[in-house]
Amino acid sequence: MPLRVQILVYDGVEEQDFIGPRDVLGHAERAGGQVRTTLVRPSAPGTVTCFFGTEVSVPAAWEPTDTDVLIVPGGGDQLIHDPEVLRNLVRAQQAGVTVAGVCTGVMVLSAAGLTKGRPCTTHHLAQAELAAQGGTVIDARVVDDGNLVTAGGVTSGIDLALWMITRECGPSIAAGVESIMEYEQRGVVWRSSSD
């Protein structure tokens, strides 16, 4: 069965935060990495307008427990103030979904209580706020704490997706994607001792 990945997009999402991971996962799909990626919206299929004005058609509604990995990109605080989204993030993780945040998308996970007392990271400008909300901030591009994986600012979403491919599909698939993209993972992935 392929690894099912959903990327949650919404009005105001930062383009690179979700396009970087989508590109990595798309190349893994084409390379036979047994990955299936879907862009999803919190409520229903439709068009979102991204942070820099790009309009993206999103084919599916978010089904919180119908995936293996959920990636929450940053870009705006709309989701932080949506109690249904926050409840669904908790429900997803409780159902066994690995929840991943990119950049300030991690602050959405924090608002849902998923980072409290756990190793995590976010964009350097939001790290103090993340720590104030109870996250144990680690200075790394990608922090893997099992069912919670977080990444720093913007381009680190590419590294998060490459790490998820390495972790779930194997290093040879990830290396193949790096070759196609002419990109090498940056920095060391910080992993919790429980892994």
Image: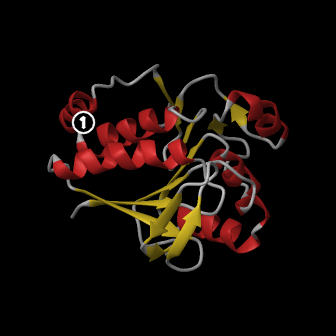
| Residue 140 position (above or below residue 22) | above
- Which quadrant of the structure image shows residue 120? top right
Up the image or down, 184 lies above or below 132; here it is: above
Which residue in the protein does label 1 denote? Answer: 177
Q: Quadrant of the C terminus?
A: top left
Residue furthest to the bottom: 44
Q: Residue at x 16, y 46 (%)?
A: 31
Say how the picture is coloured. Answer: secondary structure
Circle 1: element type: helix
Q: Is residue 64 left or right of residue 164?
A: right
Indicate whether 114 appears above or below 150. Answer: below
170 left or right of 158? left
Q: Residues within 10 Å of mark 1 (few under 14, many from 20)?
A: many
Residue 148 at least partly seen: no
Q: Is residue 33 left or right of residue 95?
A: left
The amino acid pointed to by label 1 is Val
User: Is the N terminus in the top left, top right, bottom left or bottom right quadrant?
Assistant: bottom left
Q: Position of residue 133 (x, y in %)?
A: 82, 43
Q: Position of residue 66 (x, y in %)?
A: 42, 72
From the top left corner, tell me how far across and down residue 92 is, in percent. 54, 66
Q: How many marks?
A: 1
Residue under the point 46% across and 19% down: 187
Q: Nearer the viewer, residue 160 or 12?
A: 12
x then y, percent, for residue 38? 38, 64
